Image: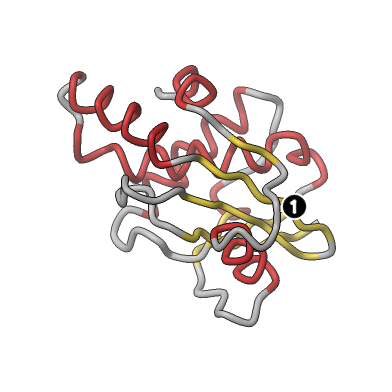
Amino acid sequence: MNIAIDQSGRVEFTNVSTVVAYANGKQKSLLIPAEEKRKLQAMFRAAGKPTMFAVKTFAILTFLLIRDDMKRINEITIDPEYPGNEWLVKQVLIQLMRRYGGRHTDEDITFWSIGRQHNAHKRAIAVYRGNTAPDMIVTAKNVLPYIL
């Protein structure tokens, strides 16, 4: 299965929730509320790594979204949310996938603008706007074990 991933409500905007969704045949989404993102941001600040908050959190959310379907996924296309930091998103994602039984390589993950007509974007925006319920709601406690 090849999937595309999109985000609505950027991670660093801690006054709104963030939704990460994928689509291609199957659709799935997760939501992390704004207050949970603020807890994570405080943890990154306390660790002296405030600039890593958005990129690492996005990568971990992406992993949590695909974790259960990881073995069926062959290729992942991610909308470039953090230009210049794609290498870090890819590195964190691959490390997590391998730690939990994935066999993916750098070549399996690409960054490409998926556009507004793609079902991943439509799913993410629908959940973000409250028109569709998310498949998962994530808290800071869910993210914390994966912060490397």
Give x and y (percent) for residue 126.
63, 65
As helix, strand or loop, the secondary structure at mark 1 comes to loop
12 left or right, relative to 67: left
146 left or right, relative to 2: left
Along the viewing direction, whichever of 103 and 45 lies nearer the viewer: 45
Instruction: Point out the image quarter for the N terminus.
Output: bottom right
**Residue lying furthest left in this view?**
48
Q: Residue at 43% across / 57% down in the picture?
A: 9
Give x and y (percent) for residue 123.
67, 64
Q: Residues within 10 Å of mark 1 (few under 14, many from 20)?
A: some
Along the viewing direction, whichever of 106 and 132 lies nearer the viewer: 132
Q: Amino acid at mark 1?
A: Asn
How many marks the image carries: the answer is: 1
Colour scheme shown: secondary structure
Along the viewing direction, whichever of 91 and 82 lies nearer the viewer: 82
Q: Residue at 56% across / 44% down in the picture?
A: 31
Q: Residue at 49% across / 60% down in the picture?
A: 8
Give x and y (percent) for residue 99.
60, 23
137 left or right, relative to 38: right
Picture quadrant of residue 25: bottom right
Instruction: Point out the image quarter for the C terminus.
Output: top left
Q: Residue at 57% across / 80% down in the picture?
A: 116
Q: Which residue is mark 1?
A: 74
Give x and y (percent) for residue 100.
66, 24
